[in-house]
Amino acid sequence: MAGALSFCLAFQYFLLTFFHYLSIAANANYNIQSLGAKSDGKTDCTKAFLSAWTSACASTQPATIYVPPGRYLLGAATFAGKSCKNTAITIQIDGTLVAPSDFNVIGNSGNWIKFESVTGVSVIGGTLDAQGANLWACKNSGKSCPTGATTLAFYNSNNIIMNGLSSINSQKFNILVDGCHNAKLVGIKVSAPGNSPNTDGIHVEKSTGVTIMNSQIVTGDDCVSIGPGTSNLWIETIACGPGHGISIGSLGWDLQEPGVQNVTVKSATFTGTENGVRVKTWARPSNGFVKNILFQHLVMVNVQNPIIIDQNYCPDDHNCPNQVSGVKISDVTYQDIHGSSATETAVKFDCSKGNPCSDITLEDVKLTYKNEPAHSSCINAIGKSSGSVEPNSCLSL
């Protein structure tokens, strides 16, 4: 009996192994060099990438698009998924994709690399170099310049993975997740100078079930920005700085706007950033909302505004609406947040007089300014504190 059982188990293992390797052998593989791509960083490889995508989409088996080591010049490219038969496409990048050096070539295209309505796409490894420095210089000089292209964008897509991907020198946003469900971003590295304009590291909006983990973001704008219609977002183990911190918003520009809810930010470190964790809304009518937010286990190192809610958001104080924010903010918890503030006011809640912030909780918070307890400021903010809280809570009960 024991011998028969052992034989059955061994045979089952053989079958599992056989079918596993059979499935690997059945996978379709497309090497972009075989499709004409040159790794010299000068030859336009856009047609080769689009050809690989077309073939992968037509395959009914899982497919891999392989980018070998080297530099590959890629123009603005859209990878559309509506007609895809395939729901398991892996893009394995061992090289670097390079945008055209002339920022005008893709600067008004909206996106450099765009995925639209895809399912089951994984982007693994590699570096995306958008060569944005000349565009930043143009913008910072006050000249008339293109808006700039987002480096990598996923729209209206499902079951997305980005793992071990680096984005450098983005013209505008580095990574955009818009209208997506179930996206996992792990081991992302973003690098841009602190004075590079509008280079948000990762922007998420109108999406559900997004996870961002184990990532390092150095940029000139928000490390992670969270737009309207985002829910069930999990952000963990992020190193942010320089940059503008992790921000919910800006929200409330439109009267009819979906809210933000069920967001967790935990185990993040902010170094030399303009903000730590921020909620920002325009002072104008809106039916938007922010609720069920947890900021937990955070470290602040010389951060200008470690904890901030700003419902009178108006960058550069230019053409400010100067109305009352309609966005309702509630059930926001700050738990186990420690470190140093670069300004005297480490906790600032500037909430709407028409819709005061409610159910704000401070728990085990210790923020110092020049090795002394920092200050807090509250306007129209209702909540409670527990445990040790420094600076002293100014929340209304």
Image (cartoon, grey):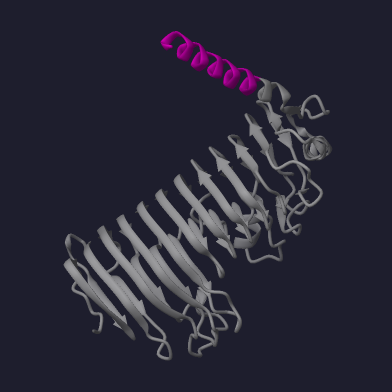
Q: Is residue 329 toward the left or the right of residue 82 in the image?
A: left
Which picture quadrant has residue 366?
Answer: bottom left
Vertical comparison of 263 with 15: above or below: below
Residue at (70% x, 29% y) in the render: 66
Q: Nearer the viewer, residue 379 or 356?
A: 356
Vertical comparison of 263 with 165: above or below: below
Q: Is residue 281 toward the left or the right of residue 55 in the image?
A: left
Do we see residue 293 in this rendering?
yes
Q: Nearer the viewer, residue 142 or 180?
A: 180
Residue 320, given in percent of the width and then of the height, sits at: 54, 84
Which picture quadrant has residue 309?
Answer: bottom left
Residue at (36% x, 54% y) in the render: 266
Residue 382, given in percent of the width and then of the height, sits at: 30, 82
In the image, the segment drawn in magenta is 1-21
Spot the residue most to the top.
3
Q: Is residue 330 toward the left or the right of residue 81 in the image?
A: left
Q: Quadrant of the N terminus?
A: top left
Residue 258, given in percent of the width and then of the height, sits at: 57, 74
Residue at (64% x, 32% y) in the render: 92
Decide whether residue 10 is among the magenta residues: yes
Q: Quadrant of the C terminus?
A: bottom left
Decide whether residue 328 is among the magenta residues: no
- Total marks shown come to 0
Residue 239, given in percent of the width and then of the height, sits at: 40, 48
Q: Nearer the viewer, residue 24 or 312?
A: 24
Q: Nearer the viewer, residue 314 or 116?
A: 116
Q: Main secondary structure of the magenta part?
A: helix
Vertical comparison of 341 with 47: above or below: below
Do we see residue 191 in this rendering?
no
Which picture quadrant has residue 179?
Answer: bottom right
